[in-house]
Image (tube, rainbow, N blue to C red):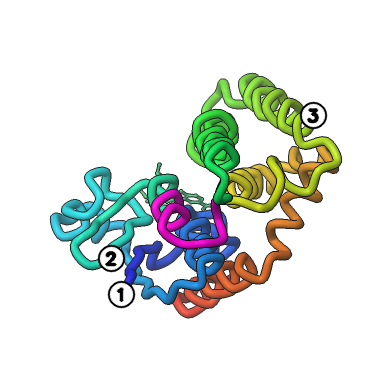
Amino acid sequence: MTITITAFERSPDGGKGLARDTRVRWALEEAGLPFKVRHVSFRAMKEPAHLALHPFGQIPTYEEGNLVLFESGAIVLHIASRHAGLLPDDADARARAITWLFAALNTVEPPILELSIAKVLEGDKPWNEARMPLVKDRVRARLAQLSARLGAADWLDGAFSAGDLMMVSVLLRSRPSGILDEYPNLAAYAARGEARPAYKRAYEAQRRDAIAAGSPG
Ligand code: GTB
């Protein structure tokens, strides 16, 4: 069955792989599944055809036959649940890997997202300069906890899993701020994720798309 996902027609990051289609592409590459990408403009995202796929008018979406999914976490979990390579066979280890996937989305990503919003959407506000250190410290607080848990391990719980895929994807969004590099084991962990052939294929494909769409790249 053909799998089709959606991605930005013109990614605002110019192909740095930070938009949320990259994590879905990565999961599909890890699972060895062929897929198509449909590119949507910001305007098209808010039109009825796309809203029928995604109630909030965003990317990514996932179509597979009659199944339509949105939310990058749900899509990655769906791929990982149905195909080998992203979740352990042992039931307890599987539950722990899924826990890390949720931790990435619900506990680590929110302060990182808040930092992006503070920079991109609130940079011109008179209170931004006073608030920014607080926002950055909230990111540091989470990364310090994660760094302590990861320690010297390669991955969060045994072998690489969908939990690592999501955590690395989330951490990469904190790298432009310089904060990720304050935690050398997390920076190395993210680099291990980026070094995976499946990540490289996903990254290169979204970058090619961004360049083809006319972004500086
Ligand atoms: N919770 C949803 C999920 O995980 O799938 C969130 C989806 C989401 O935020 N999608 C964004 C979107 O469609 C793209 S990824 N935005 C358009 C809109 O809401 O109108 C967020 C994103 C955007 C840009 C960058 N960047 O430039 O670095 C990074 C991430």
Circle 2: residue type: Glu
Please identify the quarter of the rendering in which residue 60 is found.
bottom left
Element type at mark 3: helix
Relative to 12, say whether 2 is above or below: below
- Which x, y percent locates residue 15? 55, 66
- Give the residue drawn at x 77%, y 36%: 150
Relative to 44, say whether 81 is above or below: above
Q: Quadrant of the C terminus?
A: bottom right
- Which x, y percent locates residue 41? 32, 63
Q: Which residue is mark 1?
A: 2
Q: Which residue is mark 2?
A: 64
In the image as oriented, which residue stretches furthest toward the bottom?
212
- Which x, y percent locates residue 159? 69, 51
Q: Is residue 117 visible?
A: no
Are discs 2 and 1 less than 8 Å apart at CB? yes
Element type at mark 2: strand
At label 3, counting other C-alpha atoms closer than 10 Å, the crowd grade (few under 14, some 14-19, many 20 or more) is few
The answer to whether residue 102 is left or right of residue 131 is left
- Give the residue drawn at x 50%, y 35%: 102
Q: Quadrant of the N terminus?
A: bottom left
Q: Which residue is mark 3?
A: 148
Q: Which residues are magenta?
A: 76-87
Circle 1: residue type: Thr
Of the residues under marks 2 and 3, which one precedes in the sequence? 2
CA–CA distance in space, label 2 to label 3: 39 Å
- Give the residue drawn at x 43%, y 76%: 34
At label 1, counting other C-alpha atoms closer than 10 Å, the crowd grade (few under 14, some 14-19, many 20 or more) is few
